[in-house]
Image: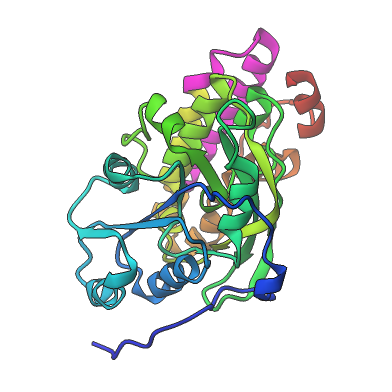
Amino acid sequence: MRALTVVRSVTPGRLRTPAEAPAVNDKLPRITVIVPHLEQPRYLERALCSVIDQGYDNLELIVMDGGSGDESLELLRAYDEHIDHWQSDWDSGPAEAVNTALNWATGDLVGVLDGDDAYLPFALHEVAKVLGVEVGDGPDWAVGSAVRVDECDEPLGEHPADPPRSLASFLMHDAGPLPGSAVFYRTELLKIMGGFDSTFRLAYAHEMHARLYTAEQRPGVIKPAVAAVRDHDASLTAAHALGCGDEFVVAAERYGNQLPPTPRYLLWRKCDEARRLYAAAEAEIAADPDRRVMWSQLLRRPWWLARDGYRRQLLRSLGQAPTAMPAPADADRRAA
């Protein structure tokens, strides 16, 4: 087991000085950060430090480890004085872990930070500016921009904070799902919604967001980038890409019935094509393991399946006739 090295302020991007910290009201809302984690010690320390180093005075940090059998527990013990509560016990997945933590949360606001992601400097101050207002005077949940990074913290691109305008455009997710680590909620809202659906092991945040859109709860926007979202082969969604894609389809079908006939039909057709592609991917990987990398890259970004070019090319290569469908921009305009 390696010796622990305490890491401070390791989040990517230019670090702002304290003088550059966003101005907020004197009465900061209490923010609970929940970190679900399982056997990612390489990134866990970065995640913890990115929360601890926020310099946010009204913070609660809860870490829910799913029973790691590696050095993760040693890391948690090393940071014990900075963590309000942590436990290491088996759970059915991150949704169950987060729901358990919500029972203990004392914050007015909640952020769920994946154990392999990190907050950017002063992220929580930015959250407080948007959600730290009286209930009814602002949104009840909000999404910020995120920076995609690799396993070495090198930037790969951005997830802009541009949430869809309608349930239809959200379920079509042409721009990709909302980055979970860059989303924050009023604690009371999550409790009213019944918490996260633990039957979704991979896309539990996406299902919650679909539920919120269905309830006509639209997110606010936190303009600055607030999180670094890690893209690596050992992540849960990368390792189980087929399952993640299937859960996206299940969520779309569950809430698609709320749509008017035309966008509902477009969504149903997209879901049908996605299921055929996932089935083809599973069959191809079983027959030719060398093609796993190609399919993994595609299925880690299931919203690509909404793009006409990708879908048509893949269906042709699989010997299936592509179904005619409007370009995503046209479908989005009709759905909205």
Q: In percent of the image, x 49 and y 26: which residue is there?
A: 211
Magenta highlight range: 254-281
> Is residue 201 or residue 66 the one in the foreground?
66
Residue 313 against residue 236 in the figure, above or below: above
Give the mark count: 0
Q: In this image, 270 relative to 244: left or right?
A: right
Magenta stretch prevailing secondary structure: helix
- Visible in this render: residue 315? no
Residue depicted at x 27% and y 39%? 103
The residue lying at 61 percent from left, 14 percent from top is 259
Most extreme residue toward the front is: 26
**Quadrant in the picture for residue 234:** bottom left
Q: State the residue in front, 246 or 69.
A: 69
Residue 196 in the image: x percent, y percent?
Answer: 38, 35
18, above or below 166, in the image: below
Tell me if residue 73 is in the magenta stretch. Answer: no
Q: Position of residue 68 (x, y in %)?
A: 23, 65
